[in-house]
Amino acid sequence: MDNGAEGLKAEYLAAEYLKEKGYVIVEKNASFPRRGEIDIVARDGDVLVFVEVKYRSTREMGDAAEAVDHAKRRKLLRAAEAYIATRAVTDTDIRFDIVAVRDGIIEHIPNAFYGYWN
């Protein structure tokens, strides 16, 4: 299987995992030109959660969660801003989570990082 197919499989596994934990999947692959893409948008109770899914086939390339570096976080923040603006999201708490998938093992990191808006 190529990396694209593995990535899609990881996103599917992540969404199923979150559903099992009681999350409601709102949208997948929300894309915003020149801003970025959000792999999964979900609700955890009253909280809107933006989820970045990372797949790694081995640990040789580093931990999947470590791949969400400062530049990737900035891009996710810009995509989240666009999501909030275009979907008319108001008066809700938000959170950024990472779901890492490797060898069928799923690691969920709630509140993986914080975003600030002015």
Image (cartoon, rainbow, N blue to C red):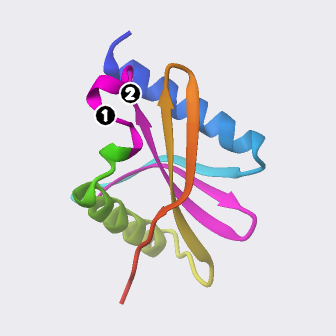
Task: Name the residue type under label 2.
Answer: Arg
In this rendering, would 47 be left or right of 78?
right
Which mark lies nearer to you, 2 or 1? 1
Q: Is residue 97 visible?
A: yes
Residue drawn 28% across and 54% down?
A: 69
Assign a secondary structure to mark 1.
loop
In this rendering, would 62 be left or right of 103?
left
Rate crowding at label 1 as few (under 14), some (14 to 19) or many (20 or more) other CA atoms within 10 Å.
Answer: few
Quarter residue 114 falls in: bottom left
Look at the picture and state if 66 lies above or below 56: below
- The residue beneath circle 2 is 56
Earlier sequence position, callout 2 versus callout 1: 2
Q: How many marks?
A: 2
- The residue beneath circle 1 is 62
Residue 79: x %, y % from top left? 36, 62
Look at the picture and state if 36 lies above or below 28: below
In this rendering, would 102 be left or right of 16?
left
Residue drawn 33% across and 14% down?
A: 2
Residue 77: x %, y % from top left? 36, 67
Q: Quadrant of the N terminus?
A: top left
Q: Is residue 33 visible?
A: no
Measure how far apart labels 2 and 1 are at the Cα level.
8 Å
Is residue 7 one of those drawn in magenta? no
Give the extent of the magenta segment.
36-65
Look at the picture and state if 69 lies above or below 57: below
Q: Which mark is residue 88?
A: none
